[in-house]
Structure formats: C-alpha cells, structure tokens
Amino acid sequence: MSAALGGAVSVGAGWASAKIAGTTGKGESAGGVLVSALMAEAVKLGLIVMLLWLVLAVYADVVVMVFLGSFVATVLIFSMAFFVREYK
C-alpha cells in the first residue's frame, strides 16, 4: 500500500500538471506557452508537497522508505521521458 501511494502522488501531480498546461494560457506566443508551463510546474510542486504531507499525516501504517522510494522512482521515470527521442 505504501508503494502504491508513493507512485500515486507522483502520477496524480503529473496528471494535474498536464491538465493545467493543456487548458491555461495562450499557446499563440512563446510567452503564453512559458506562462502555461511555469503555472503547470507550480501546481505540480504544490500538489506533490500537499499529497506527501497528506499521506504521511493520515496513513499511520505507512512504510516511509517504501513510500518515498516509489515516489522518487516514479518521479525519475516520468522525468526521463523528456530524453526519449522519436525517430522516423
């Protein structure tokens, strides 16, 4: 359960960030894209902090090392997607 919650924190924050980036700002200019991306990252970081605190405060049987380990693993895996190139 601790591992699932750690992964869910990262996935949930990433999902919210993607929704914010896709729906806010104007994609017509570079400035609009930059504002949307920065707003999405701010939401992602805020959600990560709140969800980590929520799990650690509410779930008394959490195994902290497993929880944080799965959280870090999912954050690293999703950040590595940036380096994937699609060749045609």
Image (cartoon, helix red, strand yellow):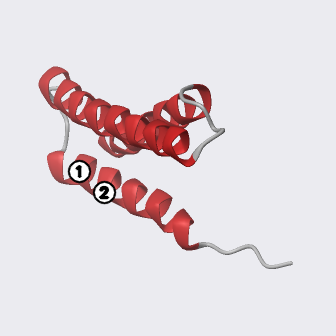
- Pick the front one: 33 or 87: 33
- Pick the front one: 69 or 11: 11
Q: Position of residue 15 (x, y in %)?
A: 52, 35
Going by the image, does 47 lie left or right of 55? right
**63 shown above or below 73:** above
Q: Which mark is residue 60?
A: none
Residue carrying label 2: 72
- Label 2 amino acid? Val
Residue at the spot x=21%, y=35% of the render?
Answer: 49
- Pick the front one: 39 or 29: 29
Residue at the spot x=31%, y=57% of the render?
Answer: 72
**Whether label 2 touches label 1, CB < 8 Å:** yes
Q: Is residue 45 visible?
A: yes
SS at mark 1 in the image: helix
Q: Which mark is residue 68?
A: 1
Within 10 Å of disc 2 (Cα), the crowding (few <14, some 14-19, many 20+) is some
**70 shown above or below 11:** below
Q: Position of residue 34 (x, y in %)?
A: 47, 45
The residue furthest top is 58
Question: Spatial distance from mark 2 to mark 1, Cα to Cα?
Answer: 6 Å
Q: Position of residue 59 (x, y in %)?
A: 20, 25
Residue 61, quarter of the rendered image: top left
Within 10 Å of disc 1 (Cα), the crowding (few <14, some 14-19, many 20+) is some
Image mark count: 2
